[in-house]
Amino acid sequence: MTSSFSRRQFLLGGLVLAGTGALAACGQGNSTSAPAASSSSSSSYPTPPNLPAPSVRKTLTARPMSIDIGGIEAKTWGYVSDTGDAAIEATAGDVLQVDITNELPESTSIHWHGIALHNAADGVPGMTQDPIEPGESFSYVFEVPHGGTYFYHSHTGLQLDRGLHAPLIIRDPQDAEDQDVEWTIVLDDWVDGIQGTPDDELDKLTGMGSDDHNGRMGMGGHGQMMHGTPDRVLGGDVGDVMYPHYLINGRIPRAHRTFEARPGDKARLRFINSGGDTIFKVALGGHRMTVTHTDGFPVQPWETESIYLSMGERVDVEVILGDGIFPLTALAVGKDDRAFAVIRTAGGQAPRPDVDFPELSSTGLLLSSLKPADRALLPEGTPDREVSIDLGGQMMPYEWSILADGQSSSATVQEGQRLRMVMRNRTMMPHPMHIHGHTWALPGSGGLRKDTVLLRHGETMIADLIADNPGEWAFHCHNAYHMETGMVSSLRYE
């Protein structure tokens, strides 16, 4: 099953942001190159700005493939790169060009998660571009304005949960870069090619029944999935799909990755949760981690033993490594399973994947409780407009929703104004809410910059943004199954 935002027609009811322009001219000025190319165009879609010649280029092909996740072969979909590695690295201020050819049996797209780019490159079919049909190619050209840990993924149907994602690391000249080693750690949940497909999982969820359980798992269909241990911070109803495998950098625990360094090395770990339905709790045995960035922006250093990372969130930590072999564990919260890797600075036998250690049982850090570094602060100001965002939904039937001020659309702001979004989670499940083209500043956390925030069940969170990037922007839950069944809206400048 393939879907686009236009097919669900949620665009008829997004948040309406009235502005003075149709598109943010990111990188305007001494431009000499043509706008980004595309496979097809529509007058209803944003027009790309003129940008300088690209300084970083990447060629990708999206196609079916077989992968080895650790002695287990999975027939799935993925990205193949002209350089062999689908990960992309650039420096803040670079103009990036990515040419994608679609060899999948259905249409696709690429979204650049967390990047404040111009609207035409955002990669949302039916909103910013036509879908890239099988056999077609498309070029994304955009400036990367900020450094940080990001990733890119398909924004079509449940393709993200089929493996169509990869890291996007943007170097920040303002960062010290004084680490001895650096690793990008991608956390994932995996079903594709093992236990059917993500679309099969969605079919089971949508076929469970008709009684309203307000976010609680019923006894039919996948009810047996949620017999995991309730988490004392997030509660019991944490996810909908019990995946057969949880991965770190594409490997199952019994065939885990090993990251090697020397005792005393300063390590920078860039964590990305690319999962479809799993919140992870991350800890490194025998170590405390110092959080330095979240969602690309620097924070006041915060030392912790464990961290919650919801779908779409990223966090950077620094660790001074001890002498030994240490478990790096990501608990699949509420699912009684885990992803696992090892950091090795000495000889000896690696710990078992099911090893427990004190850091893992500590009270985990929620990233929304961090405080921003001074250079990450948005300008201070009083909100010009406020909109109430209600997150609703139920398991039986499996339907999820976003309402603004109790309606499908209600907020109007002028470009340059500050919008306050008061988000209320009315369900019994947590929702990682993601906004495209902007980052929020969280007043309750001193203005912490985030593009993805986790709302626990019953939680209210206030998030401000400055309307400085005209266009139409998706706003949705980053649980892939919730988004696919209605927890998605848009922010629109007019």
Image: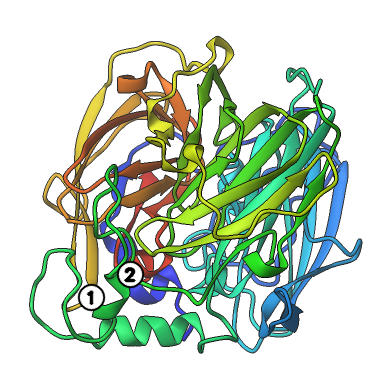
User: Label 2: how many residues lie within 10 Å, few (<14), some (14-19) or many (20+)?
Assistant: many
Picture quarter containing residue 207? bottom left
Give above or below for 440 relative to 193.
above
Residue at 44% in and 33% down? 367
Q: Residue furthest left?
A: 211
Q: List x then y, in percent, for residue 351.
A: 66, 54
The three-letter amino acid code for the residue at tag 1 is Tyr
User: Label 1: how many residues lie within 10 Å, few (<14), some (14-19) or many (20+)?
Assistant: many
Q: List x then y, in percent, for residue 128.
A: 53, 59
Q: List x then y, in percent, for residue 232.
A: 27, 45
3D distance between C-alphas at marks 2 and 1: 10 Å
Residue at 62% in and 70% down? 163
Residue at 37% in and 35% down? 363
In the rendered structure, the answer to whether residue 178 lies left or right of residue 401 reads right
Q: Would residue 308 be seen by someone viewing this image from the given angle?
A: yes
Q: List x then y, in percent, for residue 323.
A: 77, 32
Residue 207 numbered mark, or none: none
Q: Earlier in the sequence, mark 2 or mark 1?
A: 2
Q: Nearer the viewer, mark 2 or mark 1?
A: 2
The three-letter amino acid code for the residue at tag 2 is Asp
Picture quarter containing residue 115? top right
Q: Which residue is mark 2?
A: 240
Give above or below for 79 relative to 201.
above
Q: Which residue is mark 1?
A: 398
Report the front residue among 376 and 281: 281
Report the front residue among 197 and 155: 197
Q: Would residue 494 be seen by someone viewing this image from the given angle?
A: no
Asked if the residues shown at circle 2 and circle 1 are in contact, with their CB atoms under 8 angstroms apart, the answer is: yes
